[in-house]
Amino acid sequence: MPRIRVRIILLLITIAILSVMWIFGSKPANVTSDLVAIETNRVAVRSLDQRLSKMNETIKRTKATGISEPLDIVVSEQEFSSKFDSWAQPGNRVIRFHSFLGNLQPGELVLTGKFDLWRSELVFRMQIELNIEGGKRTANLVRLQVGQLYMPKTVRNLSLYVVEKLIDAGLPRIPIYIETLLVEEKEIVVSGSTNGL
């Protein structure tokens, strides 16, 4: 009998925690009040895709020859935001993403958007400090917010830790060595080289 009571109490506590999270997560919040509105468009996506296509040709050439080649790319805030918005998928009956924006601030990526979940529209904001210099990566998840629910630092650190471990393990395995990645106001600057033999 005591085990059943403990399980029922744990179940009720879990339901209560999830309910509170849903209430705060589904409350409207203005996650973009301190950000500049960015006009996303297909021209910016095509421009970025053309440069990424040229990078892919260089990567294929490196795989064929085994000789490493330098790579440099500058991505504007409009291109970044437009590409991020293009990733929003129509979704299905349960979840649908839309209105993605990516703002660039010195040293930070700010990703915002909306998603519909079970007939409720939720907004999110993810603020990431990111820098790579001399091949050494530093990253910090500064803010993770869904509606009016702010994720505590321990949850943010754990999320970032999992992502970093996946990257260190080679998931996704990118065929370039990034020497420098700088997030500046209005652009991202990346330089490195393709991985030769």
Image: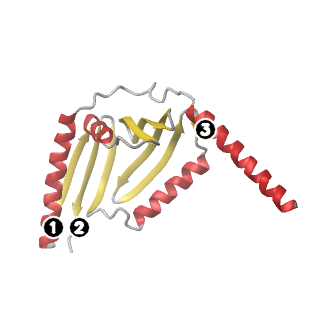
Residue that appears at 61% across and 44% down? 152
Where residue 61 appears, as percent x and y from the top left, is 12, 65
59 sits left or right of 146 in the view? left
Q: Horizontal placement of 53 versus 187: left or right?
A: left
Mark 2 falls on what kind of element?
Answer: loop
Closer to the camera in the image, 103 or 178: 103
Q: Residue furthest right?
A: 1
For the residues bearing labels 2 and 1, Cβ distance under 8 angstroms: yes
Q: Quadrant of the C terminus?
A: bottom left
Find disc 2 in the rendering and name its residue: 195
Observer-nearest residue: 20 or 155? 20
Look at the image and tell me whether residue 168 can be seen. yes
Inspect the image, locate mark 1, and give the three-letter code of the amino acid beneath it.
Answer: Thr
Residue sitting at x 61%, y 50%: 154
Foreground tag (3 vs 1): 3
Q: Earlier in the sequence, mark 2 or mark 3?
A: 3
Give residue 22's mark.
Answer: 3
Quadrant in the rendering for residue 57: bottom left
Q: Residue at x 32, y 38 (%)?
A: 85
Where is 181 relative to 33, above or below? below
